[in-house]
Image (cartoon, helix red, strand yellow):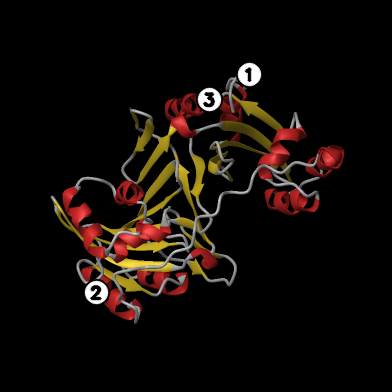
């Protein structure tokens, strides 16, 4: 992003008016700016800068009634309809946990925020939008017809930032860390992996061995990690739809992870996108950005936690999917059978 040649707010607003149907993220990329800078150019003309800390944003969201929560990365978008409640604050990590909206929040990445009112063909669409230091979207909250407009107005007034400038300084994007392996420690990795009793032990384990997630997957070998063909992602989504079983889908970025729990009912491919289009859950996945796929088996006290995990060409995690192991709704056996049938990566396949 060329920070030294940023267009003026007038230029940005003109470009937006000339491209009314283009998505904000795509228009920002075309202009060589961040999405947050595009939104900032409309301060006073549909946008209001807010204090970005999740304690304030989520408290406001809890008052809005039914909304749509959106979390994305470059390759995948998760959209969940529900209500915000049961928020747990934390300096390093926070959480929203209920049957519909399930978030893991990392406050240090909630740097810029705006309330946005946008005129659409069906009326004004209101949203709260949060961005990181680079101006990339971390999380968005969209009001629906059932939402409380008075609570929205109160939230904007309460969270309003003193700085209502039309420009915004952002930092350069940082690339995701590359896969980090330590072949000298592969036996220690396998030994520690076999002794795991909880999936949350994974990161401390690989960190202690000077590795990261993808680096560990690449060297640990069977039965812990099996690389799959990239086409297995679409095959898996179709198998889940046909089986009708509930799973957990994790989609996120550095500032927020959004988790959907439930079945997948409707798939609609469109160009490079595979789309889940269900009444309270939509997911939009760029299949052409999937570069590596791993079936991962982590032992726990409750049995194997098997996940399917997709990464882009830069090694950034696109999504994770697990079977649901709740008592009375244990879909893990069916999920594990689907994963076991997926085709393996071939050595000639370009990662």
For the residue pair 99 and 189, the one nearer the viewer reads as 189
Q: Which residue is mark 1?
A: 346
Q: Residue at x 51, y 23 (%)?
A: 231
Q: Residue at x 66, y 35 (%)?
A: 296
Asked if residue 241 can be seen in this view, the reply is yes
Q: Earlier in the sequence, mark 1 or mark 3?
A: 3
Q: Which residue is mark 2?
A: 153
Query: Where in the figure is residue 98, as x and y percent of width and height?
Result: 46, 58
Residues at marks 1 and 3, CA–CA distance in whole angstroms: 12 Å
Element type at mark 2 = helix
Left or right placement of residue 136 versus residue 323 in this view: left
Please identify the quarter of the rendering in which residue 324 is found.
Answer: top right
Left or right placement of residue 47 versus residue 243 in this view: left
Label 2 crowding class (10 Å Cα cut-off): few <14, some 14-19, many 20+?
Answer: few
Element type at mark 1 = loop
Q: Residue at x 36, y 51 (%)?
A: 32
Label 1 crowding class (10 Å Cα cut-off): few <14, some 14-19, many 20+?
Answer: few
Q: Earlier in the sequence, mark 2 or mark 3?
A: 2
Q: Earlier in the sequence, mark 2 or mark 1?
A: 2
Q: Residue at x 46, y 47 (%)?
A: 73
Left or right placement of residue 317 versus residue 112 in this view: right
Residues at marks 2 and 1, CA–CA distance in whole angstroms: 55 Å
Of the two numbered discs 2 and 1 in the rendering, the one whose residue sits closer to the viewer: 1
Quadrant location of the C terminus? top right
Label 3 crowding class (10 Å Cα cut-off): few <14, some 14-19, many 20+?
Answer: many
Q: Which residue is mark 3?
A: 232
Query: Where in the figure is residue 156, as x and y percent of width and height?
Result: 29, 74
Is 248 situated above or below 133? above
Residues at marks 2 and 3, CA–CA distance in whole angstroms: 46 Å
């Amino acid at each position: 992003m060329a920070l030294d040649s940023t267009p003026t707010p007038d230029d940005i607003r003109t470009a937006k008016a000339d491209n009314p149907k283009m998505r904000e993220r795509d228009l920002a990329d075309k202009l060589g700016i961040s999405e947050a800078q595009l939104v900032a150019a409309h301060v006073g003309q549909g946008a209001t800068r807010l204090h970005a800390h999740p304690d304030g944003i989520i408290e406001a969201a809890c008052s809005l009634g039914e909304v749509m929560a959106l979390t994305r990365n470059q390759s995948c978008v998760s959209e969940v309809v529900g209500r915000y409640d049961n928020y747990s604050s934390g300096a390093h990590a926070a959480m929203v946990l209920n049957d519909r909206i399930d978030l893991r929040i990392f406050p240090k990445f909630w740097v810029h925020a705006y309330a946005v009112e946008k005129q659409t063909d069906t009326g004004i669409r209101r949203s709260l939008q949060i961005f990181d230091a680079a101006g990339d979207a971390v999380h968005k909250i969209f009001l629906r017809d059932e939402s409380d407009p008075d609570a929205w107005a109160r939230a904007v007034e309460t969270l309003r930032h003193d700085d209502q400038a039309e420009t915004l300084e952002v930092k350069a994007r940082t690339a995701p860390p590359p896969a980090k392996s330590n072949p000298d420690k592969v036996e220690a990795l396998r030994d520690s992996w076999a002794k795991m009793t909880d999936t949350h032990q994974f990161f401390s384990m690989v960190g202690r061995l000077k590795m990261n997630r993808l680096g560990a997957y690449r060297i640990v070998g069977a039965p812990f990690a099996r690389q799959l063909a990239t086409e297995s992602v679409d095959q898996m989504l179709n198998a889940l739809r046909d089986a009708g079983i509930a799973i957990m889908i994790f989609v996120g970025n550095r500032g927020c992870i959004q988790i959907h729990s439930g079945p997948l009912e409707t798939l609609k491919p469109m160009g490079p996108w595979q789309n889940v289009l269900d009444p309270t859950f939509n997911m939009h996945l760029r299949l052409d950005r999937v570069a590596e796929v791993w079936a991962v088996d982590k032992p726990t006290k409750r049995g194997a936690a098997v996940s399917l995990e997709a990464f882009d060409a830069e090694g950034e995690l696109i999504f994770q999917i697990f079977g649901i192991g709740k008592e009375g709704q244990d879909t893990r056996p069916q999920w594990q059978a689907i994963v076991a049938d997926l085709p393996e990566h071939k050595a000639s396949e370009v990662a």
